[in-house]
Image (tube, helix red, strand yellow):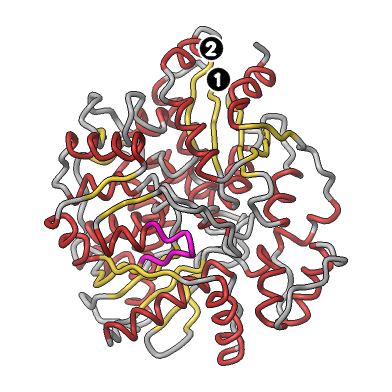
Amino acid sequence: MYISTRDNFPSVSAAEAIKWGMVPTGGLFVPQNIPFFSEQELIALSQGTYQETAEKVLSLFLEDFSAAEIAACVQKAYGDKFNHPQITPLHRLGNNLYVLELWHGPTAAFKDMALQLMPLLLAQALKILQVEQEIVILVATSGDTGKAALEGFKDIPGMKIFCFYPSGGVSKIQERQMTTTEGKNTYVVGVRGNFDDCQNAVKSIFGDEVFRSFLAERGLALSSANSINWGRLLPQIVYYVDTYANLLANERIQLGEKVNFVVPTGNFGNILAGWYASQMGVPIHKLICASNENNVLTDFFHSGKYEKNRPFKQTNSPSMDILISSNLERFLFEMTDRNGALITAWMKELQEKGRFAVDKTVQEKMEKILWAGFATEKETLATIKGIFTETGYTLDTHTAVGMKVYQQYCAASGDRTVTILDATASPFKFTASVLEALQGSRPSGEKDEFALLRELSKTIGMPVHFALQELEKKPVLQQRVCETTEIKKILGDILGF
């Protein structure tokens, strides 16, 4: 069963939690109980495939889904849509450092790991619940989630997906991926503002009971593909479990040996999945939270004070340009021993004043598992250049933020624990910035994004990611742009009321 982080809603089944997306009365769903792997179960997983690990992890959290239903979803999600047989291969970059490549899916970003599976879980949940309404999926994206969600939900019967992104606030490649999306049920809208503006507008729609009733009268129900939906977060736990099992299988670590994970972080969903894996028995020493210059999380974990009233910066790692990290609410719920009243008070304070502060006990509890740092844009570019020069390996801008923060962590702690760096995107997703790092200057504005793809491919000796090779030939199909105040009107116009 699943409960609300704010103690304001009855417990629901897994299917219901996935169908709702977020708690209708405010808050996020979390599992009432977190299952645990014994050491023997981890050994058994080390002898299987990624798909088998996924089936095992999902079965523990989705008790109202049959084994056959879960297996069918997993096989369809990870069958032939990834261009690497291991799905999430590990690249050894140093004696104690591995890069976990999470970008081998159909949109070249780690969001594919969840969003190839989540739509299938939602479709199955609707069957289990015998829902006859048409589902309207609302997505706010800072770049990568949008295309991954659009690709995952494309042409799934009984669903329409609306993707809202900050116009001018994503990379040219990210925007082109979204605006060329095919499918009769996909809608893409640029929003004048930043990601937080998009996310807040979408959240307000979910919390609008009058609007939800209005939709229900017309046979429509809302759901979300953002990581506020448990069905989106759950598949991300899999690759933490699988990575540990992989290291065991290849005798890179001993059973019970702890590892670190470095996670480039914006909305706190990816790193939270790592925390859930640690609660399931994966021996994790530290989760290293890496931010860019929008370093609201770094400041929070160092001070205990969350302050979103600060300048918003558009950086060369745009998927992390976020000042309100939605999944932090789930983490704080666990850090306060599931004190829903306290979470409600903090989230109300954040909404009304733009800030809140945790007590020293909670701060100390977080510090035991989490270390936080941030990288500037200049440091990000220098890190890409440095790693390429030293090893020949190419990082994208977000993964480079993680690498720089890992270097900071090692300098501060002297820790030499085996560490896995989450590589969250292919370098081809952020071609101009990666070329700038390698060449020392920004590419000429006369070159379009596709000429830059070819130039980067030649520079690093690596073929363009398969998801981007045909992008140049695709026509732009989605050109809507609106103000945040016009989102409901856009929805109404498209849905026909």
Q: Nearer the viewer, residue 60 or 347?
A: 347
Give coordinates of residue 368: x percent, y percent: 19, 67
Q: Residue furthest top?
A: 217
Give coordinates of residue 396: x percent, y percent: 59, 70
Q: Is residue 200 visible?
A: yes
Give coordinates of residue 272: x percent, y percent: 34, 55
Q: Nearer the viewer, residue 220 or 451?
A: 451
- Classify 222 as above or below 335: above
Residue 102 is left or right of residue 237, and the answer is right
Q: Are the residues tagged 2 and 1 within 8 Å (C-beta)?
A: yes
| Dot 1 crowding, Cα within 10 Å, few <14, some 14–19, many 20+ | some
Total labels drawn = 2
Give coordinates of residue 147: x percent, y percent: 63, 47
The C terminus lies in which quarter of the figure?
Answer: top right
The stretch of residues the image draws in magenta is: 289-296
Rendered image quadrant of residue 229: top left
Residue 249 is left or right of residue 467, and the answer is left
Q: Is residue 290 in the magenta section? A: yes
* Residue depicted at 80% across the width and 57% down the height: 470
Residue assigned mark 2: 219
Residue assigned mark 1: 134
Distance Cα–Cα, label 2 vs label 1: 6 Å
* Residue depicted at 60% across the width and 42% down the height: 193
* Residue depicted at 51% across the width and 71% down the height: 376
The N terminus lies in which quarter of the figure?
Answer: top left
Rendered image quadrant of residue 405: bottom left
Q: Is residue 1 visible?
A: no
- Classify 20 as above or below 405: above
- Classify 64 as above or below 149: above
Three-letter amino acid code at the position of disc 1: Glu
Q: Of marks 2 and 1, which one's residue comes earlier in the chain?
A: 1
